[in-house]
Every structure is written in C-alpha cells, then in structure tokens.
Amino acid sequence: MTDVLTEAQQLAYANAQAADGRVNVEVETEDGMTLNIGPQHPATHGTLRVVARLDGEQVVSADVICGYMHRGYEKLCEVRSYPQVTTLINRIDWLGSFANEVPFILAAEQLMEIEVPDRAKWIRTILFEMSRLANISLFIGDLSLQVGAQTPAFLAFRDREYVLNQIEAVTGGRFHPNFDRIGGLKDDLPKGWIADTKAAMVRIREFCDLMDELVLGNEIFQMRMRGVGIIPPEVALSYGLSGANLRGSGVDWDLRRDANIGLAYDQVDWKVWTHPDGDSYARSWVRVQEIREATKIIDQLLDTMPSGPVMAKVPRIIKVPEGEAYVATENPLGEMGYYLVSKGDTGPFRVKIRSASFNNISIVPWLLKGVYVPDIIAILGSLYFILGDIDR
Amino acid sequence: MISSVLAIDWSNYWQQSIFRVLGAAIFVILGAGTFVIAFLFKMMSYMQSRLGPMEAGPHGTLQLLAEVGKWLQKEDLIPSRADRTLFKLAPYIVMASTFLVVVVMPFGPDAYFINVDTGIYLALALASLSVIGIIVAGWASASKYSLLGALRAAGQLIAYELPMVLAVVGVVIQAGTLNLQGIVAAQHQGEIFGWGGIGNPFILTQLVGFVVFLIATQAELAQPPFDMPVAESELVTGYMTEYSGMRFLLFFIAEFASAAVFAALAATLFLGGWAIPGVDLDDNVMNVVGPLVLFVKMMLVGALIFWARFTFPRFREDQLQAFAWKALIPLALVNILATMVLKVAF
Amino acid sequence: MARPPRSFPLKGLFIGLKRTAIIFMQTMFPKRGIKTVLPAPTIGAHTVQYPYKSPPEVPVTRARGVIALKSENCTVCMLCARSCPDWCIYIEGHKTKAPPRRPGGKERTVSALDRFDIDYSLCMYCGICVEVCPFDALFWSPEFEYSETRLADLLHDEARLNEWFETVPEFEPYEAGSTAKVRKVPR
C-alpha cells in the first residue's frame, strides 16, 4: 500500500477540489455576500448545506449541497442478505421507521409472488400509519421551533411518546422496528395492544387540536407562512416533488389510493387532503390533517382486524428468484421506492433507493430566489426533509 | 433589622455611596437572577410539561450559580479577524446601560439615587444606549451571522423606541409630571370615580398604553415574538454568536437584567411603583418595604412578558417594522389624544 | 379551503396564550382529588427524573434491551454469527467426543463452546441472531442499564451473557384472533 496516488485518483482529487472551490469561493461581488447555512446549523434538519448569495436580507441565488451524511446504503445492500438489508434500511428515514421497510419487502414479495395473509396486511398498514404519526408530529413541533415558538416542540415530543410506546410494545424497538419480513411479519400482536392503541389515538387527536390552537391558528405563524414559498402545481410535478408538498399545491396524488401496493387501504374509508394555495402554510396544514386521517384509518383497521396467521409459508433461507421489481409507497416524507434487482441469491444484487427528500429539495434553488433569510428557514422547514433520506 | 438599616448615617458621603452602589448591584443581579430562575427555568419548563433543571439546589434554584461557574470556566475565544477592542467593549456597554436605568428608579420615599424632574425621560434615554452595544457586538465579531443580527437589531430597536416613548407620554399627561416619584404619588393619591381606596393605578385608565409599552418592551429586549436579532434557528445567536465564556455571560445577564429593569419601570408607571394603598407616602417603613413591593410588582409584569415570549413564534423583520410603524405608533398616538381630551374634561 | 374568518383579529394569539397557561396549571397542580390545590410539579410533569425515579411503565416485554444466551442449548452451528449484519458475534468452538447414549454404542461427536462474545458497541439490536437460532439458545431481554465507561467493557463474554438469561421474561400471550402459539422460554 503506497502513498502515491494513481493518475485517475489524482485527477479525481483535483476535480473534487475544483468543484468545492466553485462553491466555496467567497466572491463579494455586486451579487452580494455569500452566507453558508450549514452544514452545522440548528435549522437544517441535519447536515445540509445551503450556500446562499444574499443582497442585504434577500436571497439572490441559493445552492443546495448534500452528501455530508452519505452512508453508502446502496453499496451496503449489495453485500447483505435480505433480513440484514431489512435491518439496515430502517435507518434511512429514521423518524418514519417502519415505513422504510415496506416498499422493499413488497418488491421482494412481488418477485417471489407471495400473497401475505390478511392479518399481516392489516398490521402492516397500521404500523405504516403509526410511523406516519410519529414522523409528522415531530415535523410540526420542529417547524414551530424553526419559526420561533419553543413550546410546541416539547409538546410534540411528549405526545409522540404514546405512539412510540405502542410501536415498541409490538415490535420491540421504538425507532427501528425491524418487523417486516418477506411473507408477513415477525410476530403477532401482544394481548391488550388494540385497546392501548385506541387510547393512544385519542391522545394524538388531542395533540392535533393542540397544534391547531398553538401553531396553525396562531396569527404570527400564519403571517410567516402564508404566501411564502409558493409552488405552482406544474412546477411541483416537474421537479418530482411528492407527498404533502404535492398535495399542498393542490395536486390530488396519493399512492395509497392510486397504486395497488398490497396494503389494506382499500378496506378503509379515508380521505386525501389537499390545499389549493401551495404555500408553506398549505403544506403544514395538509400534514396536520394527514395525522388526523391516520388516526381514523388506524381506528377502522383495529376494529376490522381479521384473525389468522401473520406469516405465509416461506422457506427458511429466502432466495428471491431472478428479476427486477420497483415498488413505491406513500411514505411520511413522500414517495419512497425501491428498485430491486435480484439474481436468485440470498441477498439482492442491486438496490436503488428512490428517496422522497432527495427529490423534494431539488426545488430549493428555484424556490429560494428573492425570499428573505427568515423565509429560507420557514421554507426548508415546510418542505420537510430528513438528511438520512436525502443522502442515504 | 429595619431600625439598623434606617439608622445608617445618611449624611456620611461614603456610607451612602457604598450602600447605593451595593443596592443597585443587588437589585439588578437579584432581579435578573430571579427572572432567570422563575421564568426561564421553571415557568417555561412547566409550560412545556417538563421540570427544568432540578439538580443544583432544591428544585434547581441554584442552577444560575452553576451556570455562572460554567460560563466562567469556558475558553475565551476571539475571532481572528475581529476588532479586538470593540469586541471586548460591547458587553460592557450593554451592561452599563442597564445599570444606569436603575439610577432614576425610586424604591421608596427616600430610597432613590437621584430624583430629577425629568426622571422618566432620562430612564428611556439611558435604556436606548444598549442599542449601541448590540450593534458594536455584531460588527466587531467579523462574522456574517453576527452582522445580520446586528443590522436587524439596529432597525428593530430604533423602530420600537417610538411606541415606548409615546405610551409613556400618556402616563405623563395623566400624572402631570415627568418625575418618577411624582408619578408614584399621583397613582397613590388618585381616586377612581371619587373612591380613593386603592388609589388610581394607571393601568386602569391607560390600559392601551400599558399594552403598547409591554409590546415595545418585548421588542426592546429582543425577545420572541420580536427576536429577529437573536433568531436562534437562523442566526444561531445573532450578534452574540462569536461570544463565549465570561463575555457571553455578561450578555446573558444583561438581557435578563434589562427585562427586570423594564418590568420595574412598567410597574412604576402603571401599577403604582413602591407604594401600597393604605400606607402613607412619607412613612419611613416604606423605605424597606418599598423595594419588596416593587419586586413583587416587577415579577407580575415579568410573568406577562415571559408568558408571551414562550408562546409565540417570531415575526419576520419587515412584518415587525410594519407592526411598529403602522399599528403601534398610531395606537399610541390615539391613546395620547384620548388621554389629553379626558384629562381636560375630567 | 380557507379557514373561517376569526371573530376578531388576534384571537389566535389569545387562544395560544390560554393553552400555554392551561398546560402550566396542569403541570403545577395535577389533578389529585383534594390535594390538587398544592403545587406538585414533579407529579404533573410528563418527564421522569431518571435515575432517581424509574418510569411508571417499565420496558415492555418485547423491548430489545440485551441478548441473553443459554449455553446448554448452543450447538456452535454459527448461524447467528453468520447472519449478523455487523458481524459482532464472535464464536469459537471445538469438537469433542461425548459418551454414547446407551452402553455399547458409538461415541458421539459434539461441539463444545469455547468462546461466545457479543460486542454491544457494534450490535444494531436487529434481532436476526435471536430469530435464526434453531436451538432456542438466544433470547431478548428488556434490560438496558448496562452502559460502561470503557468501550472494551461492552464486549459481553459467555458468562455475562448467561447472567442475562435470568432477566428474560416469559413470552406474552397474543391478542385475540391470532393463530400464533406462545413459545416457552426453556428455563
């Protein structure tokens, strides 16, 4: 192992330095001053870097640089077996814990052509919606923190505990459930879980009312968020946004209803919320309504829970037959999809992860032109990304 | 104890001076400390369903001492491109302006530092000195975040001086004097529709002025919802970003000392100051009980200020300026007009 | 989908103030019958002063706290070490001869465990090892208070892993409608 780099390595190093320099150069021209927001910053949800050129307090142009948290997921998945991959992908979007596993398992089941039992479908959907609850309740608390109010953040953490306790009771882990298996689930529900979860849903509905009072109904919050960061629907679709960002611009798009993904949404009476405005307030409002809707979905599913096994008949060592499959689901952050290429091994050959946040922040340079510095934070907060999801 | 305090030889210059300096320091530090513990550590925590610091002292009451010790032992950093003299000077300017306002505050019939006829005018003038300290801190730090914070502070603090002064003008018209002792006397001896039971605290007739004064105070202290200069989620700590150790401690104490001093000022102007209804103004006992009464009233006003602080998100600075110029100043002017008319009519 | 207009502007601010005041009073004076008039913030707050007081709900039965080993059941098949995503289980064993089951029979070859360590500084608490063990030798235990000051102390050896076995709870019964059978922990 010598210290001398090869030609190719030297070239790559020089290119990296040049690319860095293009962004790092502090040219104080008439364009204004360059402000580096991040990667260490209280408001960027992690290690995201936004290089903004400011003219006084207005943004002239903004550049988003991600990759500070790249963990090499797609490469990691190539050298692991299927249960091990399930463990790893829990950690991509670490707040929406269970939701990460679902599209991958569904893709593998699609290749194996397995039909999971109904009870497994129901429980999968319930846990999927609970991860949505956990994720988005933290979103609304964090958003109010970024806009300046310190109290709703703590209340969000307090009320989120009820959901996390329920997830822990059935899976054993609050944040990383690691519960989905090819063919069904790892285990069944413990005794008393249904009643406890219904009580937790009551609390979450109270939490939604609390957020309505403290955050959404607050005139100062509305002044900060209304009319800020308006995304027209065509622009949203062209940049590949998904989730509540799209629905906040009035586009009626929800994969839970439109795509037949093998979860139990067609058995439940529920509604997709949209808002025509397209500003930051609309996106936040849509998300709070989604929490309420999720509690209703969970209640209905708990009432109609079928009995039966939770695991289909699968061999001990799972070998997925050759083929390719892409399954995308409506995760809390947006549309998350896994493109699974299998060559008949015990582990995947290639996993491509389409994460929602990576596409969601692609609109940031377009969106931040001409806004004030405080609005940058409000907009980034309302777009709601998680760094693990962007960088994988 | 009361007699020993009252038995101090007031004609002796040095005894008086030492007592006055100690008194001012104790009032400011104690006021700031009580505000920090009662409101920042405990009231905010209870509003957020948690307990706050509990380790240092019973229920965390000595946490402030622990914080002081912590800040004192931190490394003292000065950015390499900072203007060293100005950087070191800025916290002292802010502290000085806070201490100076205490000079005109009356604590009792004879317990005051100076009794000038332009008392409240002097107090407001001294209070605006802190703006210089904040701008100097932001500029001397040689950091873009501090600079943004300082520029925002410049606009905000100057804009909100006006509603504060105009709110006070209403009180002055009703009391008939700028002298702070005179204002306390006017509230103590006033009557509400002929009944002199509790005097006439100006909060009853000048409610609009009180609200405007509180909002302007909130903005002067750079607290949410007006904390654009210290927007924690954007500018990390605004003009204080590059400060560490003892200097940050000075800013911290100055922030809460200012809150205490402004609350005491509001208590003097609107709630009746150190006087309690029923006890004569000249009574010698009030020299000792007066500061305690003022303390209690200061805590009441402080509770209002901090209650609003922990509930509301922050304004953007253009909304902030619009609020000051288009909403508060016209409201204060209307208040003055109404006060003038009613003063002449009644 | 606009909100209905407020009855007067700034009403939202007052509602917010009222809500924080209510939470303050709930923390300061929790409902305790006649004793509600006494302030008791340590009871009213939602936080618990750990480690002086333990939380009211102890970790649930299925909580993934620590992995316990029952050495008698282990046959050194190495399935757990192979399936760990982190490769944090270190197993060494050797083959020995055991006496025949009935007199006059052949000697059996059994595997004996030399070393079974789990490195908890690497462990991801995924549970694949517990799941794949075909001989019921690994179990989950909800114990979580095993923090150390040195990283090397987080390598639990066979003796310590066997100690954790005392803390393994019985498997809970399932919810109504389930067809799964409740497994028994081999004591």
Image (cartoon, grey):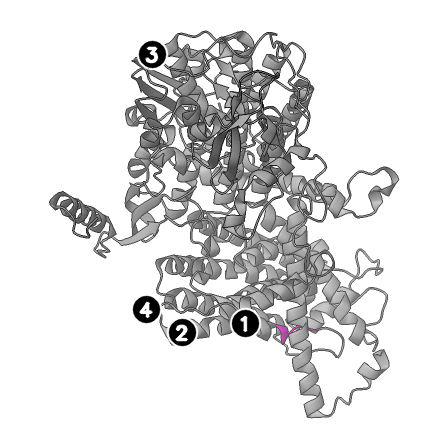
Q: Position of residue B235 (x, y in %)?
A: 42, 53
Q: Quadrant of residue A104?
A: top left
- The dot on residue A321 is 3
Residue A299 painted magenta? no
Magenta portion: prevailing SS class: loop
Give the SS element for disc 3: loop
Question: Which structural element holds mark 2?
Answer: helix
Which region of the structure is painted magenta?
B102-106
- Give the image location of residue A6, x and y in percent: 14, 46
Front position among marks 1 and 4 = 4
User: Are there few (<14), some (14-19), or many (20+) residues within 10 Å of tag 4?
Assistant: few
Q: Secondary structure at mark 1?
A: helix
The reply to the same-chain question for discs 3 and 1 is no
CA gap, disc 1 and disc 4: 25 Å
Q: Badge 2, how many Cα within 10 Å: few under 14, some, many 20+? A: some
Identify the amino acid type marked 4.
Answer: Arg
Q: Nearer the viewer, mark 2 or mark 3?
A: 3
Q: Tell me if label 4 and label 2 are in contact, CB under 8 Å.
A: no
Reply above or below: B140 against A102: below
Q: Chain of mark 4?
A: B
Q: Secondary structure at mark 4?
A: loop
The residues tagged by marks 2 and 1 sit, at their Cα atoms, a distance apart of 15 Å
* Residue at image mark 2: B86
| Residue tagged 1 | B95
Q: Which residue is rendered at x = 68% and y = 63% of the image?
A: B62
- Residue A328: x and y in percent read 38, 19
Residue at 33%, 48% (x, y): give it. Answer: A58
The reply to whether dot 4 and dot 3 touch (C-beta < 8 Å) is no
Tag 2: residue type? Answer: Leu
Q: CA distance from mark 2 to mark 3?
A: 72 Å
Q: Is residue B260 above or below residue C53?
A: below
Q: Chain of mark 1?
A: B
